[in-house]
Image: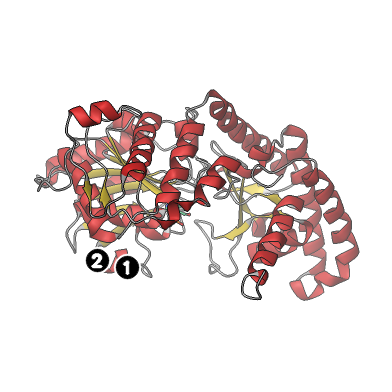
Amino acid sequence: MSEFIEPVFDLIEKEKKRQREGLELIPSENYVSSNVLSAMGSILTNKYSEGYPSFTGLTEWDDDEIASKKLANHRYYGGQRNVDRIERLAIARACRLFHADHANVQPHSGAQANMAVYYAWCRPGDTILGMSLPAGGHLTHGAKVTLDAHIWKFVNYGVTAEGDIDYDELERKALENLPNLILIGYSAYMKIPDFKRIARIRDDVSRKAGHEVLLMADMAHVAGLIAGGVHPNPFDYGFNVVTTTTHKTLRGPRGGLILSKGHVASPLSKPDHTLKNIPVLIDRAVFPGTQGGPLDHIIAAKAVAFGEALQPSFRTYVKNIVDNAKILADDLKENGFILQGNGTANHLILVDIRASYGIDGKFFERALDKIGLTMNANVLPSDKSDAFRPSGIRLGTPAVTTRGLGIEEMHMIAKWMKDVALICQKAGDEDHLPEYSDELKSIRRDVKALALRFPIPGID
Ligand SMILES: Cc1ncc(COP(=O)(O)O)c(C=O)c1O
């Protein structure tokens, strides 16, 4: 290997070792199957295919049907025979998984998916109502540092002291500001949203404002749980659009996905600005609106992952994610940890580590890293500290559940977390942590021994 290549592959090998010998508890991460990995690393990365394969009523396999309907092919390049079919597969499978009328599988990431929906529906200066970042929302829901926040006016709602979405605040702000888009979605929220109530608020806003209001759910975190039937589907409550990443609980390649309900038609048509036309407005907003050529290798990997998620075994997998998260949450409470919302109803747990053990989230995150448990410091809704020294630590069970960990292992993780929290308490700060390196090393050995018992798909 040349000197240009070797250092990169060396680091990939080191990362493999890190993943194999530790336990991944960041709730937004997962391990993809070897088939997803192969599709991502395939020669499809050589292809350009700006545009869309075709636009309506597609079944997964039926090329004859496509030919008989003389479906237009809206690509700007030749040589599309195979990638067209792959993209159609991904679209059809995504629609089946989420009961959507339409899927755009081209967004390069969750942030791009959200941006495209805003661009599809909102004019510059329009109002979008979403959850605030400290309450658990995502950066793309209106954080000042984003391009989105420069284009659209974001109004945010928060959560109550009990950790529920503050539906009264949401309703009041919705009726005061008459937003064009109401968004429910989060990166650090562990309850099941009341989709029905939110849909009712949207209807009230629509009536009062005299215009249609788009109802959008950013389900990046819980998409796998929805696909596997252990979490309600926003489409069952009248939502127009669901966005998601494909790499979290959905266990696909890194990427974005936009699902919608409405009339599916050619992206070259010039549709009226109505909710009925949202699928076409979204296609136009993704390409050419906010992106260039799609990543065909990633779309192929999405098609594989969606196929995997349609299997009965995926339902068992997501049920196990939630079961593991509930067990881990109970164990953590028994070990003295105070949890935001007092537990979890999904895959994600947020610990108030400052209230529990008097240490900050970053210190705890770094100490846990030393024993091979990976999770991330996170602000809490009530946090007085900034994002660099927040009071929370966020963890979740999608990745460890893929690896096959269960009840016994959840007990062990909670116990190790307590042991490390006590060491941090004694050390006082990171500078004094080396004084406890023998204790940390001993726990590290136990974590590694456990991790090596559970192979990682795509690696082992
Ligand atoms: C709710 C939510 N939306 C959007 C995103 C953005 O996804 P990406 O990192 O792929 O841009 C995330 C990522 O963490 C998320 O949690």
**Residue 414 percent location from the top left of the image:** 74, 45
Which amino acid is tagged 2? Ile
Q: Of 61 and 406, which appears nearest the observer?
A: 61
* Other residues around mark 1 within 10 Å, as few (<14) / some (14–19) / many (≥20): few
Q: Is residue 279 left or right of residue 142?
A: left
Q: Of 259 and 455, which appears nearest the observer?
A: 455
**Residue 232 percent location from the top left of the image:** 42, 30
At numbered mark 1, what does the secondary structure look like: helix, strand or loop?
Answer: helix
Q: Is residue 400 left or right of residue 260?
A: right
* Other residues around mark 2 within 10 Å, as few (<14) / some (14–19) / many (≥20): some
Q: Quadrant of the C terminus?
A: top right
Confirm whether residue 352 shows in the render.
yes
To which residue does mark 1 refer? 147
What mark, if any, has residue 6 been given in the picture?
Answer: none
Which amino acid is tagged 1? Leu
Q: Determine whether label 1 and label 2 are within 8 Å by CB.
A: yes
Q: Quadrant of ligand 1?
A: bottom left
**Residue 105 percent location from the top left of the image:** 35, 45
**Residue 346 percent location from the top left of the image:** 54, 38
Confirm whether residue 33 shows in the render.
no
> Which residue is farthest front?
79
Q: Quadrant of the N terminus?
A: bottom right
Measured Cα–Cα span from mark 1 to mark 2: 7 Å
At numbered mark 2, what does the secondary structure look like: helix, strand or loop?
Answer: helix
Q: Quadrant of residue 361?
A: bottom right
Q: Is residue 249 left or right of residue 415?
A: left
Give above or below for 29 relative to 35: below
Q: Quadrant of residue 398?
A: top right
Q: Is residue 212 left or right of residue 19?
A: left
What mark, if any, has residue 151 been given in the picture?
Answer: 2
